[in-house]
Image: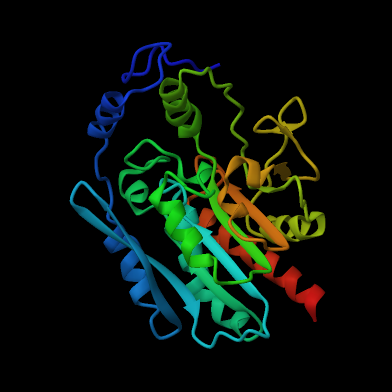
Amino acid sequence: MQDNNDFPVGTPGKKWSSDDKAQWLALQSVKRSYTADVVGQIEALAAQFEILNYGELTYDNTEYPLYALKSKHWDSTKPAVLITGGVHGYETSGVQGALRFASTKAQAYSRDLNLLIAPCISPWGYETINRWNPNAVDPNRSFYSGSPAQESAALMALVKEFEFVVHIDLHETTDSDNAEFRPALAARDAIEQKNWEIPDGFYAVGDSENPCHDFQAAVIAAVRQVTHIAPTDQQGMIIGVPITQQGVINYPLHKLGLCASVTNAKYTTTTEVYPDSPKVDSENCILAQVAAISGGLDYLLSVTK
């Protein structure tokens, strides 16, 4: 179990005050560039996509424009697909996987599908390698009306005008989840957090209210061609949740305010890769994300044609 007794911010047994959150924020620092790593790649895709500037975040006098890539020839007779990455900015392959798919695979699918790709929903989190935003709010628990996270609210405003059939949300599960982020959560909320065994490999999270078993199976099958699928722990679970098939668990997406609940898409999945595995490198993680998207879209095309 994780408690907040050893975390450097806050008072054990008490939820964080605004001063505690300010102290936590003062400990964060920029470690990489959203402009160089992400915006540059988006701008390079201007010939293939319409680039949407769907909002702007301002934190500590720094402005972060929010971008999405939209199929240039949007056709309302085609199924629409939403691909999101970087809800948790520290999860690198989610961001880079969305961009890699856009630059290498998207045009082939654009013949039959409309694509909207939001590769980096949380740019401050990307730059500081953080799960939260500067207000110590987790955007991936904030997809609901009156959201406290600007990042989540901006995406909800963007997608509300579209009807999507598929939404694939790209994530990672890292060693820092147990080492850093769950201790921070325990300290912030003054609630003990149960650590789980970090799964060594790829897994997917479906919706317990709409599990889409065949769709999840197609994602897993595609990823298996690129990297290994996470085994269960000794209790037959992945991150404390029973599997529904190899490499798949389900969460109540809407109840938890998760990004994959942001549309009414028939098929949804959240990908999770493990970049700290000795069996992979950053490139393999990116390719696993691309494979997950391709597997899901190939399944969609197989049931709609």
Residue 25: percent from the left, percent from the top? Answer: 27, 34
**Closer to the camera in the image, 200 or 48:** 48
Q: Is residue 116 above or below residue 189?
A: below
* Left or right, 215 with reference to 204: right
Residue 246 picture location, percent across and down: 78, 45
- Quarter holding the C terminus is bottom right
Query: What is the x, y in percent for residue 233?
Result: 71, 29
Numbered label tally: 0
User: Which residue is at a point 56% across and 51% down the rendered structure image?
Assistant: 259
Q: Is residue 245 above or below residue 47?
A: above
Say which residue appears at 75% left-offset and 69% top-offset.
Answer: 299
Q: Describe residue 137's horizontal placement relative to residue 265 as left or right.
A: left
Quarter of the image containing the N terminus? Answer: top right
Is residue 193 or residue 151 the one in the foreground? 151
Residue at coordinates 61% horizontally, 28% vertically from top-left?
A: 197
Which residue is nearer to you in this view: 226 or 124?
Answer: 124
